[in-house]
Every structure is written in structure tokens, then in C-alpha cells.
Image (tube, rainbow, N blue to C red):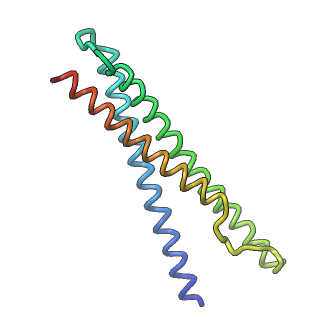
């Protein structure tokens, strides 16, 4: 039993480390792209956006902001979920009727939906900025 528990704990630690790495990447790349893009496109008087370029750029900026916000929300929910599980587990030592099984519930669905939405927003924003930047240069 202790081997299974150790394997489970190792799996959970590995999953949290991967989540933290992915969130750090999204925050770094989205923040850097947003900063550079805003600086270039608002600071330059020679760049003229035509057609749908202003709308794509604005959408891209909002998508990157949303991706960063959702990434932080995912980490916060994971931390709160794990804290609540730890507290239930601690109470279960004294009261066996407390459910500390940690079976998936609606919180996991919120984490998954928020995470996927964050990733899609990040990709949309990054691709949008790339489109506008290459259109301006061409």
C-alpha cells in the first residue's frame, strides 16, 4: 500500500510541476508578446494598420490578457483544491466518516475548462500578433 501511495504522490508532484512550468511559460511568453506588441504598435507613427489588422491586434491583446488571467485562476484553484483535500485528510485521521478520497468532482472540470480556454486564448493571441506583425512588414 505504501508503494502505491508513494507512486501516487510522485505522480501528483510531477503533474503539479508540469502545470507550474506550463503556466510560467504562458505568463512569460504572453506577457512578453503583449508588452512588445503594445510598445511597437502604439509607439510607432510609421506603422499603419489597414483592413482587419486593428481588430485582429485588439483581439490578440485581449486574448493574451485573458490567457494570463485564466492561467493564474487555474493555479489558484489547484492550490485551493489541494488545501481543502489536505484539510479533509487531516480531519479524517480523527473522524473516519470524513471523505478524504479526493475523487474528482466539478472543481476538476473547472480546472480543465479554464486551462484549455487559457491555452486556446494564448495560441489565438500569439498567432494574431504574428499575423499582424507579418502583414505590416509585407
Residue at position x 29%, y 21% in the image = 40
Specify the farthest residue to the front: 51
Coordinates of residue 7 in the picture (x, y in percent): 51, 81
Viewer-closest of 110 and 13: 110
Looking at the picture, does residue 123 appear above or below residue 16?
above
Q: How many marks?
A: 0
Pick the quarter of the image with the C terminus. top left
Pick the quarter of the image with the N terminus. bottom right
Coordinates of residue 129 in the picture (x, y in percent): 31, 31
Q: Quadrant of residue 79?
A: bottom right
Specify the farthest residue to the left: 138
Q: Quadrant of residue 49?
A: top left
Looking at the picture, does residue 107 appear above or below residue 135?
below
Residue at position x 73%, y 66% in the image = 87
62 lies left or right of 136? right
Specify the farthest residue to the top: 45
Looking at the picture, does residue 55 appear above or below residue 78?
above
Coordinates of residue 115 in the picture (x, y in percent): 50, 51
99 lies left or right of 50? right
Residue at position x 64%, y 67% in the image = 104
Coordinates of residue 77 in the picture (x, y in percent): 62, 53
Amino acid at each position: 500500500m505504501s508503494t502505491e501511495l508513494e507512486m501516487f504522490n510522485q505522480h501528483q508532484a510531477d503533474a503539479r510541476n508540469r502545470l507550474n512550468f506550463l503556466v510560467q511559460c504562458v505568463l512569460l511568453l504572453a506577457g512578453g508578446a503583449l508588452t512588445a506588441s503594445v510598445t511597437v504598435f502604439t509607439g510607432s507613427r510609421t506603422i499603419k494598420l489597414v483592413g482587419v489588422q486593428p481588430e485582429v491586434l485588439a483581439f490578440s491583446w485581449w486574448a493574451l490578457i485573458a490567457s494570463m488571467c485564466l492561467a493564474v485562476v487555474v493555479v489558484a484553484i489547484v492550490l485551493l483544491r489541494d488545501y481543502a483535500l489536505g484539510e479533509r485528510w487531516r480531519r479524517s485521521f480523527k473522524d473516519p466518516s470524513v471523505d478524504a478520497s479526493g475523487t474528482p468532482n466539478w472543481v476538476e472540470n473547472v480546472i480543465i475548462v479554464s486551462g484549455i480556454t487559457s491555452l486556446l486564448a494564448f495560441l489565438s493571441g500569439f498567432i494574431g500578433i504574428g499575423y499582424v506583425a507579418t502583414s505590416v512588414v509585407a
